[in-house]
Image (cartoon, helix red, strand yellow):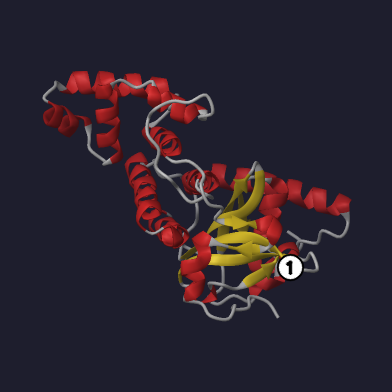
Amino acid sequence: MTPWVNDDPDNATRWLDDIEVRTREVLAARPSRTANHQDETQALIALAEQLAERPSGVLGRLAELVLQLTPSGSAGISVLEHDREGQASFKWVAVAGALDRYVGGQMPRRDSPCGVVIDRNTGLLFEAPGALFPSAAMLKPAIGETIVAPFHRHGRPAGAVWAISHDPRRLFSAEDMRLLTSLASFVSLKIFSPQIRSFAPTTTQPPAQLALASLTGRQKEILSRILDGQPNKIIAADLGISQRTAEAHRAALMKKMGASSLSDLVRKALRGLETPATVAFDPSRGESQDLTVGLQADVGADATLSP
């Protein structure tokens, strides 16, 4: 493909169409590993625990989990920011792996895969991104390919979660894209600092909290154990019930929560247990706040990803 240039609207639209089609075709043609929902669930629980214990480190923890769960050599989170002149860029607020020295650096929006993902508002695969984006070509070690998924604030793209492969033998699959998109949705939900609330319903509570409030006492006990990562057999033994009864309670609570899978149940339960309190960062103001404080403290002066 030709390098990304968005000066001409018609050319930009065609380029975006091409990269989206290319993503679907390449990932569909590659062998895809089986989804490991248990690891995904444990990752979501680990992020929830990080939020409770040290919110400023949650994005760094997310980058580490992406690195562990995908065949990537680097992973990170980029936040869209604007300077006083209105120029947009992506700040690498968290990076794990081979490119971790670039944490705190910035990449121009118009010269970044994250910018394309935000324009398209969908996860995309970029093969040899150094040939498409000059800023990406400057990174060392070189990027073989990258997958990028957007996250949102108030319904609008606010940044992206990404995974990079530096090894041509380690390619991303459709399952890697699904997982990255799932973790990006967690960022969308948890872009605010958490504050644990009770199960008591109010007329202003969102659907997930109302669903939690409708659970029976036994279903809440089982949900708590699911969030601890316990399988049905262990849950049944702990509660003194049969495994079949535990499975029936689990099926009933999943139906009440509107969850299609175990990982979906965990996401919805975490959404219901926590509520927005303090803004973590505000892209429209061009500044990072609570969630990135801990990360920036170790960076010092911002690194530079482009000249």
Q: Residue at x 40, y 56 (%)?
A: 65
Badge 1 element: loop
Which residue matches tag 1? 83
Q: Nearer the viewer, residue 143 or 32?
A: 143
Would you say residue 76 is visible in this rendering? Answer: no
How far across and down, in percent of the image, does residue 47 sit?
39, 51
The image position of residue 299, as x and y in percent, is 51, 77
Quadrant position of the N terminus in the picture: bottom right
Depicted 106 relative to depicted 183: above or below: below
Quadrant, the C terminus: bottom right
Residue 208 visible here: yes
Q: Residues within 10 Å of mark 1 (few under 14, many from 20)?
A: few
Q: Residue at coordinates 62% horizontally, 43% vertically from top-left? A: 24
Q: Residue at x 59, y 78 (%)?
A: 303
Name the side, left or right, on which 15 lies relative to 262.
right
Q: Is residue 129 above or below residue 215?
A: below
Q: Which residue is rendered at x = 59% and y = 63% of the image?
A: 288
